[in-house]
Image (cartoon, helix red, strand yellow):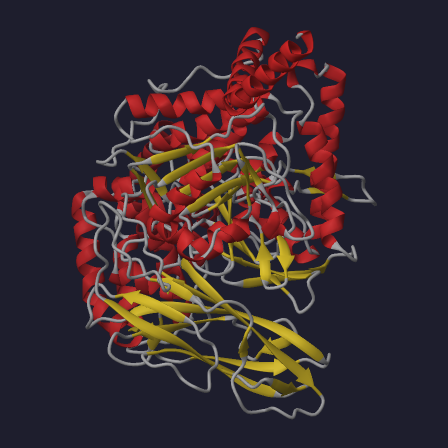
Amino acid sequence: MAWISLDELLEQIVLAVYARWHEPELAGLQPELDQARRDLAHTLTTLAEDAVPVGEDAILAFLDRLAAWPEVVACAPEAFDQVATLREALLRRRQGGRPVRGTVVKATDLSPARRQDLVALLEEGQPAVLAIRRRHYPRDPGQWAILLEEVLDRLYFDWDQLPLAIRQELLDRLAALAPAVDAGHSLPADQILALLTWLEAQPAVVAIAAPAFLAHKLAQAPKTIRHPGQRLVTVGSRLATMITQPPSVDAQLHAAAIDRMEAAPAEPFPAELMEAAPAEGQEAPGQEVRLHTDVQFPRQVQAGAEVPLVVRLTLEQVASSLVAGQLSVTFDQLSKPEYVEVVLVAPGFKERTQSWSRTMAVYSDRDSQPAIFLLQAGDELGPRRLTLDFYHKDRYLGSAPFQVEITATPTQMDGGVQLDGRPLLARFLTQPPPPADLELRIVKGSRENVLNFVLHSARAGVGYHWRPVGQVELTAANPAQYLEHIFEQMSSLAARPVERLSEADAAVAQGDIINVGQRLFQELFPPELKAEYWRKIRPLRRDEANPQGLIRTLLITSDEPWIPWEMVKPYELDPDTGEERSDGFLAETFQVSRWLAGRGPADAVQVRRAAVVVPRSDLAYTAQEEQYFRQLAENGRVDVPEPLHRVQEFLQLAQEGSAELIHFAAHGRFEADNADLSPLSFEDGALTPEALSGQRVRGLVRTRPLVFLNACHTARLAFTLTGLGGWAEKLVDQVGVSAFVGTLWEVNDLLAAEFAIRFYEELRAGATLGQAFHRARLHIRDRQPANPTWLAYVLYGDPNSTVRFGRDGESRPEGGPSELSPADVGLDLEQVRASLRQSLAASLQAYIEQNLPQLIDAALARVLDDSSTLE
């Protein structure tokens, strides 16, 4: 076995340490490491040419010095393991003994030229830069584009950490590349290499993006190297957007956009009500072009046959398409294209290139480039449901599902596919907020109980690009009935009075909740998705234990109606070894939000007017929510009229669109047989989702408010004759609200009030929608972990969108209590009694007002009757 020489081992270890120079583990050791480097460099500089043993001893002493720090050994553990063997071999050679059995010791090279190289290595002023520059680029230029995307991703995320001069130089270099990207969605390979070479030479860049360079560059040079010259490399939509639409040179503006996002006017709903006047304070939309979806694919495909699926966006409706989707596209500049990524989910088919996404350039004056998928039908015959998802700037625009049939003898090879759902309606945003760190796309199969899973992340370091991760067939014949039992169990636990729960009862309740979450993970996650969770998703999660993680926000885009994904709790037990792996609930460990497959979510909400719907009822803690909004109005930031109590009052609000925030605190009930009949209780009756349609909702369509239904079962969905049904589907997919908050089961009144107030206060403090929702959830979890109310809440919305309160959109700085925030609702029995007395008094007053005339008439009648009897 051959061993490297001592000077080569020194170089290997030093470069390994340099590669991790900026990591937190080494940051505190840098002064000691610098001193050790200087000492060895001085020894080698003054070393006589014939004093090789002295030099070897100095190198070994230096390596022993490094080995005293475990953090340094972790940089190159295998190399440090060789030090002892090499030391023994050198000692035997000096003493004239036999060499170590099975080893060949190379002579240490301490010639003047070699010592000069080693001294330069030890005296390097930018260790991390040197470590990266000593590595080699892979042979394939396509890998260079992937590396560039990951480097830019990291730089944009920490844009404010770059010096102004570096930011400006980078923007100038990107501007020089932008015309080529716009023209052909590609770049010459040597231009990509030139930009990467410049980036890796900048210490400030390396401090941020070193992990990306080290992950992609090779320790050993490729066996064959060919100069790429002008070879064109395809640029994906993510990298194209990074090059053509980089952040502002102003780091303050960009940091604000990343952390809180600049407020933007709500997107208008591009349906038949699109001509309604814009809401107060909204900007007029930019230059828009209406485009149509053109999907060409046969209705029937022969088993085993390969057929192209062609997707375009056209200026005119194509008759043979039959997919009546529309997109209202806003172009920053009419002369420059926008880029749309088309993602296909096609169970029962294979794709020749094994790539399930395509990027097409979309133009304002002509039809788009085609996106072509080469699909081969499988052998299993029967109907198949295919889904096309459209993304712009990594932002979900909407979906176009359609049905085809795999058959042995096709009879309808010609003709377009039939759209399975409502037409696609979407609008491009000029400056959307960053996408979620990870998206889990769940697509219903041809049968209702079959779900297909796809993972994607716009962050290059995460490593998912529309990767299929399995399929699951729900074992229950009726999934709705299967989950109904879980909802009933959670409702029963949530309804228990929190002040009466003993420690033993609380432990049992927590165990029941955990058991349900772990069972959902076992039964709902396919094996491929489970493996990815433990292999990559969990290690990349960003939290206090891993502040350098890449995944913090999780968006679940789905078209199934039943599953409480927030409650899934990963757990694994190896039956052979007994080894366990466990993690928290998804809603606990990530900022989880949902969206329904259909149209994309809004990016921001500007709240100038809020409406509170609080029917007089026996809910003890609704007074807390009323008081919160009353104080908000008194402060003058938001107009809040008197609470609404009656159905007609709410319908008038929905038609006029006189609020950007609607908060509902009342009773709700879910009708599993027909979700569109699930009622919300008002003082004078009930309101169902099916009652909100047509002109009744034109105001909601125009203003796209944030809607919070703080009532039981309001986030539940079910299938109806025409698709999904329920409050979430009505408000999110049909009305198009900016965001929706509801519950999956009964919630505790006390905790419900606390959740709502904490949620709004976090938004007012500048938190994003996902941050505010997650913090409110954890707040009530910490208050009552044995009560599943904290898991009942569901957010439909973009986790990175913002909600600004007030006419000027100002938000309070984060940190510190709000002057409007009522004291946290505690388990104070006197407070409970006071709230109950207040609620009872309100109910009694309402009863008297409604029935007093009849009572007086009845009393007078009795008096007259008694008088007649006496006479």
Q: Could you tell whether 161 is left or right of 303 in the image?
A: left
Query: Quick check: 76 above or below 413?
Result: above
Please, which residue is most extreme toward the front here?
Answer: 871
Residues 340 and 118: in front is: 340
Quadrant of image for the C terminus: top right
Residue 86 is at least partly visible in this image: no
Residue 412, percent from left and from top: 61, 91
Q: Quadrant of residue 747?
A: top right
Residues 8 and 773: in front is: 773
Residue 623, percent from left and from top: 48, 20
Query: Quick check: 222 above or below 493?
Result: below
Q: Could you tell whether 604 is left or right of 472 in the image?
A: left
The residue drawn where x is 25% and y is 55% is 277
Residue 680, percent from left and from top: 56, 39
Q: Quadrant of residue 359?
A: bottom left
The residue drawn where x is 35% and y is 39% is 803
Q: Could you tell whether 2 is left or right of 479 in the image?
A: left
Q: Quadrant of residue 147?
A: bottom left
Disc count in the image? 0
Residue 169, percent from left and from top: 17, 54
Residue 558 is at least partly visible in this image: yes
Please, which residue is most extreme toward the right here?
Answer: 576
The residue drawn where x is 28% and y is 41% is 255
Quadrant of image for the N terminus: bottom right
Query: Quick check: 412 above or below 800?
Result: below
Query: Quick check: 126 above or below 1?
Result: above
